[in-house]
Image: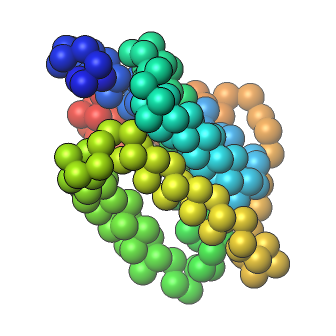
């Protein structure tokens, strides 16, 4: 967006389109994670990320990219990330079971946050070294690797958790719970 327009405010809009869906769709995505097979949700959302990143890479590399396309792809990626988040977090227990859960959660959080810290730095180096289009293509390749890794998991070795039955008011109940717990409430307020 900055290369196309030079407008820092539009960069902010693109970032908002990536992260606002987490706030808006978070409760719904949590309910979805409780009802659907988490591995399938992860696979689908990583596939969406792969395709959208691949399309953006092709648009940039071909010189046919427009700001609206970047914004649309940012929004698609934000929605996919918001839907994937609760399933990714909960899927850790399905991969390792309860015996190794504490260490697995710590490792998952560490790799996720390190990726958020190191990823943009690596992308910045790639943008300077090989250009934006190729940097985005590398990102598409990494999400394609995630699709491959999730696809190759052996479902019979996973420890599935029981699915929550559908009932009225689950999102309202989750929001009420979050609001009653100060640590959760203030984390969400600060995130917003």
Rendered-image quadrant of the N terminus: top left
Of residues 19 and 49, the one nearer the viewer is 49
Residue at 76 percent across and 77 percent down: it is 154
Residue at 23 percent across and 52 percent down: it is 129
Of residues 103 and 152, the one nearer the viewer is 152
The reply, left or right, for residue 6 in relation to residue 156 is left
The reply, left or right, for residue 153 in relation to residue 134 is right
Q: From where the camera sits, is residue 146 visible?
A: yes
The reply, left or right, for residue 70 in relation to residue 124 is right
Residue at 29 percent across and 62 percent down: it is 114
Vertical placement of residue 158 versus 127, above or below: below
Of residues 35 and 131, the one nearer the viewer is 131
Counting the numbered discs, the total is: 0
Rendered-image quadrant of the C terminus: top left
Vertical placement of residue 138 versus 185, above or below: below
Residue 152, given in percent of the width and then of the height, sits at 72, 72
Of residues 20 and 142, the one nearer the viewer is 142
**In which quarter of the view is residue 163 placed?**
bottom right
Residue 60, given in percent of the width and then of the height, sits at 42, 31
Q: From where the camera sits, is residue 164 visible?
A: no
Residue 143, given in percent of the width and then of the height, sits at 53, 54
Vertical placement of residue 75 versus 139, above or below: above
**In which quarter of the view is residue 156 placed?**
bottom right
Vertical placement of residue 43 versus 166, above or below: below
């Amino acid at each position: 967006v900055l290369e196309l327009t030079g407008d820092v405010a539009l960069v902010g809009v693109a970032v908002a389109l990536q992260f606002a869906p987490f706030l808006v769709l978070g409760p719904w995505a949590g309910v979805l994670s409780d009802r659907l097979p988490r591995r399938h949700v992860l696979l689908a959302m990583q596939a969406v990320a792969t395709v959208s990143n691949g399309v953006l890479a092709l648009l940039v590399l071909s010189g046919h990219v427009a700001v609206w396309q970047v914004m649309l792809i940012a929004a698609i990626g934000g929605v996919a990330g918001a839907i994937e988040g609760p399933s990714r977090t909960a899927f850790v227990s399905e991969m390792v079971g309860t015996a190794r859960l504490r260490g697995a959660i710590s490792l998952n959080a560490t790799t996720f946050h390190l990726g958020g810290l190191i990823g943009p730095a690596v992308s910045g180096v790639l943008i300077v070294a090989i250009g934006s289009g190729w940097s985005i293509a590398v990102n598409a390749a990494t999400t394609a690797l995630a699709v491959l890794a999730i696809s190759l998991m052996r479902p019979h070795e996973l420890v599935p958790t029981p699915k929550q039955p559908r009932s009225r008011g689950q999102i309202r109940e989750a929001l009420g719970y979050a609001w009653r717990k100060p640590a959760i409430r203030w984390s969400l307020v600060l995130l917003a």
